[in-house]
Amino acid sequence: MRNLLVWRSAFLLATVGSIASLWNQDRMADFLHPRYAALLPWSAVVLWGLACAELFRWRDGADGGKVRPRHVVWVLPFIVFALLRPEGFSDSFQRSRGLSAPSRMLAQAQRPETVTDTVKIESAPDQDSGVIESTEPPSNDSDWITPLRQAASLGKAMAPVPVPLDDSSPSPPVGKASIWCDLPPHPGKACVDTIRDRLWYQQMLALYMDPHRHLGRRVWMVGRIQPDALFGNGWHHVGRMMIWCCAADASPVGFYARPATGAQVPDSGWVSVEGTLSVREGVLPGADRASPVPVVLDAVFHRVEPPRQENVFPFAY
Amino acid sequence: MMTLSDIALVWIAIVLEALPFVLLGSALAAVVETLVPPRWLERALASSGKAGIALASVLGLVVPVCDCAVFPVVRKLLAKGWAPSHATAFLCASASLSPAVLAATWWAFPQDPRIAFARAATGILAGWVAGGLVGKFWGRRSPLRKTAKVMDLAKVKEVPETLLDLAEGRSQQPSACCGHEHGHTHIGARKGWMGRGLDFFHSMADEFSENMVYILAGSLVAAAVQVLVPSEALIALAGHPFLAVPAMMAWGFVLCLCAHADAFVASSFVGILPPGALLAFMAFGGILDAKNFLLWWSSFRPRFVLMVLAAVVAVVMVAGLAYPLVAAR
């Protein structure tokens, strides 16, 4: 009788764990590359099958009908995850990662191959110097990705293929959204470069690669804000966690921003930020020398709801 | 509280990333358990010697398993009598040789695809050296801890015939298997497709349960280290020319990344760290990381683990230091 109860409990736990993994898939997928997250439902089905097979084993009296903690322990992380309900990386975790990813991007950007690609793109015909304007989100991936590949000046060296995710950030200001506005701006036409979820890495890399080229751009993006005194008091960092594989390698990428005079600045949480791109010399965390860093001046912040997918995934593979 | 939440988040991310591959490895191990006869491997590979080690090190090209999936397969093959030296070579080399891993590495380093070849070569070399070392100093003794439960094929001639009959399904005599009397059914004892199917699932469940305990514990340790120790400390250490390779090996060990994805993380360090350190990060992390180390430690005898670990560390270190010199030519 005791064995029967134990095995039934084990079976129930296994089933609940499997269902929980399915139920939580959206949240879990935020911390895993989508390619791995896509394997979770299949894994849950297999686990459920294993739990059923265990019932047959009890019926057969196999293994002496003994149950050990190891038979059910694999549901433990699901239970911990459900109890703690982590809503995202904490500010302290983000800070412990050093807000350092920009320095890595910078180092990549200074590779000769990448810089060569920039030159190629600048001279490409029929692309209006890589300027693409649109006031509506593109209707399909190719509309969105192809101009990006040219406009973001990355070329083959980085081989970026954005992960096909829904762009889940709050919408940019209607009527003036664009990726890569004309420089210098058209007279009388307000245009704001929006850093979008799907193009995050590519757009940020392009900006970090040659910040002087983008002086004066108006940019708009959504990210988590926290005070950062790299360039002095009153500066903030607005960024998103970028994940290549899973939460283990997450690192923040974003801008240092200085608020406009009189602008209200939240201390933490999700904000949209709009401001003018400029360049400062600074030693980024993890770097051993000063380098030109794109910063946002005259920044205006607004609190926004967290995006459905908080983190960004630069690569599909 | 936030720290706990971060640890839980990183923990579950590592576990979920590994889960499908552990299931795959458990399924392959169950195939070995239910379909490979106990003495077949020994008969097939007993006399292959050093050629067997070489063959086992490149087996990863045709048996594409990553670091999470390879361990259950190797453990089961060892239990079935595969020579420890051959099993070690396969264990160390297979993750680096998986076609998907090589393709990902190639793609992540478009400016230097030679690093994909270097990764494969490092894996093969680690397999050869570790396998050779085990062949010379460990011999054919089983490296598994629980030799009472699994048959040590090195002593197969001393095993009572009734046990082999039972394991091969020729006998149902209940008292011969475990040294005591009871009436349970063992894996391999059932007949017919239905019986084989149940055997497969039971073997897979056993293997999965066994592995997950240690993967959970290893991942928890790795997650705690990642949250509590700022990554910049280790990365800053890696900036030193002589410490870069060992520091990145340690970072690869702690990060517990999937072998299919670690190349992309490594590529984000291009320009900051020397290419040899990136090679060491991928090669060492692909063979052994914190979550797999506990698996090794729990299943293998400590001396065996230390022997293999020393060989792998030495090979990866040399490869990491030598790569810039070779690549410069």
Image (cartoon, coloured by chain):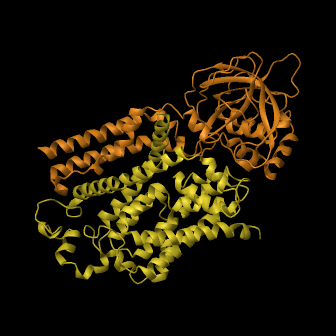
Chain colours: A orange, B yellow
Q: Tell me: A289 left or right of A199.
A: right
Q: Nearer the viewer, residue B88 or B171?
A: B88
Which of the 4 image quadrants contains residue A191?
A: top right
Image height of A116 relative to B58, above or below: above
The x, y position of residue B251, in whole percent, is 57, 55
* Residue in the image at 50% along x and 74% along y: B130
* Residue in the image at 59% along x and 66% along y: B120
Image height of A313 relative to B204, above or below: above
Q: Quadrant of the N terminus of chain A?
A: top left
One can see residue B258 in this view: no
One can see residue A188 in this view: yes
* Residue in the image at 16% along x and 49% along y: A59
Q: Nearer the viewer, residue A239 or B3?
A: B3
Q: Tell me: A128 left or right of B61.
A: right
Q: Tell me: A293 left or right of B126.
A: right
Q: Nearer the viewer, residue B198 or A210?
A: A210
Q: Nearer the viewer, residue B198 or A243?
A: A243
The x, y position of residue A7, in whole percent, is 20, 45
Which of the 4 image quadrants contains residue A48?
A: top left
The x, y position of residue A169, in whole percent, is 61, 26
